[in-house]
Image (cartoon, grey):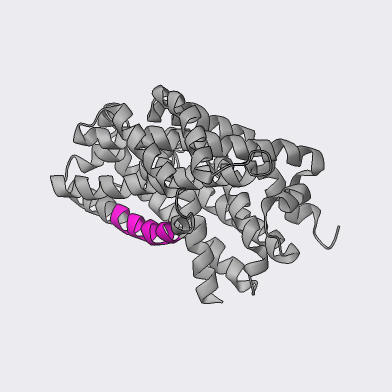
């Protein structure tokens, strides 16, 4: 039970911590000043959503997200949100390609060169096999979290741990709703696929509470660290680099490599998800379809990593509020007493 519970916990965290989160840009767009309460609310809401989705998946022994979406939304709205998941995967991959360009700029590479390199590696992956994506992500995410938390704690130590939580200054609490809603669709897509693999209800509690506490704690620490460099964030496409400027060059190199790898695996997962959905409509070698997708996406990366996140992530946060509400209300409307 514990082994499986921890496995699902890291799956949830890996789904949540993409390049947008790891770079700090996603957190900065939603939180920032007066957001301590918002992050606490996010932790609670995220934990509840994980529990509900996993319970439905476990009960119905699901293998993919369409039956779960139908239970939550009904057949008509499922078609809409099925399209939205594809749109989300497409736009997220565009953001990752842009992130690849922005990340390598720290080494004086032109933006377009970084984008082309990342796109090339994604296409190259589909020439051989896609199973390596899952294995690499399972290894990379714990290392990324460990290094990220280490950097943040060391940074706070240098600053004298100026963290404070005043409940009189918490005007940004509604951001908890849109931030949680933003991450609902990929969470549904991933957790709905493991319903028939869960053996015990205890796995749900371990995975949900564990992932909620870890993500909430890291988000709070990360947000407080970003507040200390708020004046410099405008100068960086990737806010993490505003924190890393206080560190030796080798630390910048290590974190940049890890961040780039997180971007790569997220982009590869996005393309894989799109190819899996498109295979009924378009036939052909996976690498050729991946090349076609990357070619369509590449011009859109000119909007810039930070601009794409600033526009698309809040938009998805609002659009996903309906499915977010449906998940929260599901246990009430399907309670035995009713």
| Residue 230 rendering spot, x and y as whole percentages | 29, 32
Image quarter for residue 207?
A: bottom right
> Residue visible at 25% across and 52% down?
151
> Residue visible at 27% across and 48% down?
257
Query: Residue furthest toward the front?
Result: 284
Check the image and report above or below for 94 versus 40: above
Magenta region: which residues?
135-148
Q: Is residue 323 left or right of residue 216?
A: right
Q: Is residue 166 visible?
A: no
> Residue visible at 46% across and 38% down?
170
Camera-side residue of 223 and 165: 223
> Residue visible at 31% across and 39% down?
226
Does the stretch in magenta take in 141? yes
Q: Is residue 136 left or right of residue 272?
A: left
| Residue 205 rendering spot, x and y as whole percentages | 58, 67
Query: Residue furthest toward the bottom?
Result: 1
| Residue 71 rendering spot, x and y as whole percentages | 77, 51
Camera-side residue of 99 and 219: 99
């Amino acid at each position: 039970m514990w082994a499986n519970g921890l496995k699902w916990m890291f799956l949830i965290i890996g789904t949540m911590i993409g390049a947008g989160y790891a770079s700090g840009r996603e957190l900065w767009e939603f939180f920032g000043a007066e957001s301590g309460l918002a992050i606490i609310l996010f932790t609670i809401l995220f934990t509840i959503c994980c529990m509900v989705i996993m319970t439905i998946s476990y009960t119905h022994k699901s293998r993919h997200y369409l039956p779960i979406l139908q239970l939550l939304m009904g057949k008509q709205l499922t078609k809409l949100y099925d399209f939205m998941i594809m749109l989300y995967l497409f736009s997220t991959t565009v953001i990752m390609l842009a992130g690849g360009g922005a990340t390598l700029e720290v080494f004086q590479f032109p933006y377009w060169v970084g984008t082309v390199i990342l796109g090339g590696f994604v296409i190259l992956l589909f020439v051989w096999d896609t199973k390596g994506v899952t294995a690499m992500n399972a290894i990379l995410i714990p290392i990324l979290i460990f290094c990220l938390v280490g950097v943040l704690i060391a940074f706070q130590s240098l600053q004298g741990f100026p963290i404070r939580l005043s409940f009189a200054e918490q005007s940004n609490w509604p951001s908890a709703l849109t931030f949680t809603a933003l991450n609902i669709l990929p969470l549904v897509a991933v957790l709905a696929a493991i319903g028939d693999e869960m053996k015990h209800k205890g796995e749900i509690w371990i995975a949900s509470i564990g992932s909620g506490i870890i993500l909430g704690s890291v988000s709070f620490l990360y947000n407080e660290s970003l507040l200390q460099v708020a004046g410099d964030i405008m100068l960086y496409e990737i806010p993490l680099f505003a924190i890393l400027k206080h560190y030796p060059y080798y630390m910048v190199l290590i974190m940049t490599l890890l961040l780039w790898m997180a971007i790569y695996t997220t982009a590869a997962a996005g393309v894989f998800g799109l190819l899996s959905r498109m295979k009924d409509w378009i036939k052909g070698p996976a690498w050729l379809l991946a090349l076609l997708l990357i070619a369509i996406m590449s011009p859109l990366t000119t909007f810039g990593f930070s601009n794409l996140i600033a526009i698309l992530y809040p938009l998805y946060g609002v659009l996903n509020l309906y499915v977010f509400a449906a998940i929260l209300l599901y246990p009430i409307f399907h309670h035995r007493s009713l």
